[in-house]
Amino acid sequence: MSWVMFRKALKDLRWTVFWYAFGLVLYGILILSFYPSVRENAEEMQQLMGAFPKSVMEAFGANNMSTLAGWVGGKYLNVMWPLIMSVFIIMAGAATVAREVERGTIELLLSVPESRTRLLAAKLVALFTGILVLVAATIGSIALGAVLVDETLAFENLLALGAVLLCFSVAVAGYAVMLSSFSKERSKPAGMAAGLTLASYLAWVVSDLSKDWEWLRNVSIFTAYEPQPALQSGHIELAHLGALIAVGLISSVVALAIFRRRDAIS
Amino acid sequence: MASVPIEVERLTRYYGKRRGVMDLTFEVQEGEIFGFLGPNGAGKTTTIRQLMGLMRPSSGTARVFGLDCWRDSTKVKESVGFLPGDIRLYEKMTGEEMLDFFAAFRRVQHRRFRRELADRLGLDLGTRIKHMSKGNRQKLAVAQALMHDAPLLILDEPSSGLDPLMQVEFVELLREEQARGKTVFLSSHQLPEVERIAHRVAIIREGRLVAVEEVARLKQLRERRMEVTLHAPVPSERFSALEGVRVVSEAPGGKQIALAVRGKLGPLLRVLSDMPIDDLTFAPPDLESVFLHYYSDDEDPELSSETQPPVEVRG
């Protein structure tokens, strides 16, 4: 990995990461600040939830909202968080190669005595660092929010949640960068990666609605994304996390291989 | 370094079915300034991009100091200072930050030389690139290419965007670099510019190499256009009798004559000095006349639109 490139890529990302982190922290604390009223009306809440079919509630991540983990999961982590993070990751990931090509800076960038692999690896690591900061900000905001509403969250549970959020983000980053590695304009890989993420989400939702579509669970990254059990009890499925990491790392390696061979011209 | 700075052998590149360059073979020797001349779209940038390992040849090889430009491109770039044809820079950086960024990839820093370059080119390195004019961006990119003190400079249309005074300074800089042992490979679509700087030129047209010539020889081959306006008629034979002078056209009445002039100017100027001249224009040399020479026995070349505006000499 090229440290010079890593420093520049990180510097390029710093304000974006800062504002996303700010938004995620604000959102996390806001959601948690409403939890005391939910806690007080736990019984009514359960009844209200019982009115919906269980599968529908699970599909939209809104089950068992009366517990802290259920509330944070349903209102934040299950849908909203991956949505916000996907926007950041897809925009930043799609930019790695395609924006350099689109803006024409690739010619000068590739005139440096550094291999393409090391240059892109540096950009990838910078993106992963940005992701790490945002995951840490999320975990931090949940921990802080819990303290503010007089709840305690086990450190292991927060750590487990961090692992889930991180693995999901790495998977999305992997294919966003891979799609960027052969593109000439940022909008194309960004559109493709967003489409892929949305399709993956829909596949997961549909797979829960009918037995006929259950097989779709196997092709969706959202099947492996389980933040709520992690926060609830510290439970993580290692196989699921492994699958997410594999998607991220394999597509990163493919991205490096493609970038090494492609013509670097706009 | 013992190996030849640039060796190109049967280099061919297609863009799908469209031709890029075909079957190029030439060498650039150590310590020379080598011009790569051709009209826009002839394949100059395609060739340079292959030298820089930005794209892979369809067939043939390009080598820099004995190293393959595609396979060993990282190593190749250690010994090359590069100026792209289409200057696109990181807009958010200042000039200083950009030069720092590109210098950081090299083992040795030449901060004093860089300052000297910036001073000579009149560059304000504190300005953000997005606020720089086209000329200043070009100067910044030139400084970037030169500052590494690399033994080979590959410059794609280096003087485009520079004002005439800065072009003079730039030529001076290149001559100094050459005196320090550097090899320079520069592309251009302007014959006079290449004639001013280079010792040898490769001429490329429609993706194929037309010729590799010494500049001195090229000057003998190409024709320049002269238009003479007289206030009394003069028989055109007085011109056509001179060696290397051809009468292209003559207005009725013999007061306006267009000539094509090749080789030495002295005899023609002596004849002109005795004539009743009202006006005279002498165009700078242009590429088409060179192509005309090389294709005169072959096909009639389709002349491109890059003719030079004539330089006026009023009498």
Image: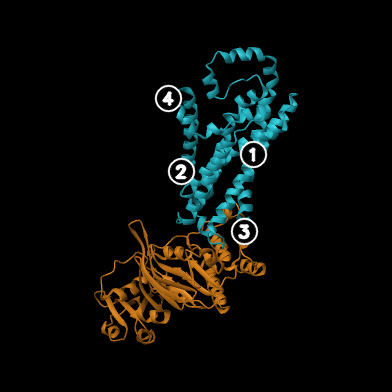
Q: Which chain carries label 4?
A: A
Q: Mark 3 lies on which chain?
A: B
Percent from the top left, x then y, of residue A215? Answer: 45, 30
Q: Which of marks 3 and 4 is in front?
A: 4
Q: CA separation, marks 2 and 1?
A: 25 Å
| Quadrant holding the N terminus of chain A | bottom right
Image-quadrant location for residue B116: bottom right
Point out which mark residue A212 bears: 4
Answer yes or no: are tags 3 and 1 on the same subunit: no
Q: CA separation, marks 1 and 4?
A: 37 Å
Amino acid at circle 2: Lys
Q: Is residue A136 positioned above or below B84 on the image?
A: above
Hue of chain A? cyan
Q: Which of marks 4 and 2 is in front?
A: 4
> Mark 3 = which residue?
B101
Image-quadrant location for residue B235: bottom left
> How dense is the environment of label 1, judged by Cα within 10 Å: few (below 14), some, or many (20 and up)?
many
State the SS at label 2: helix
The one of A32 and A106 positioned closer to us in this rendering: A32
> Mark 2 = which residue?
A188
Hue of chain B? orange
State the SS at label 3: helix
Percent from the top left, x then y, of residue A121? Answer: 57, 52
Q: Can residue A202 be seen here?
A: yes
| Quadrant holding the C terminus of chain A | bottom left
Residue at the (55%, 33%) spot, across then down: A224
> Mark 1 = which residue?
A134
Residue at the (57%, 25%) spot, across then down: A61
State the SS at label 4: helix
Which of the marked residues, 1 or 4, is nearer the chain's N terminus?
1
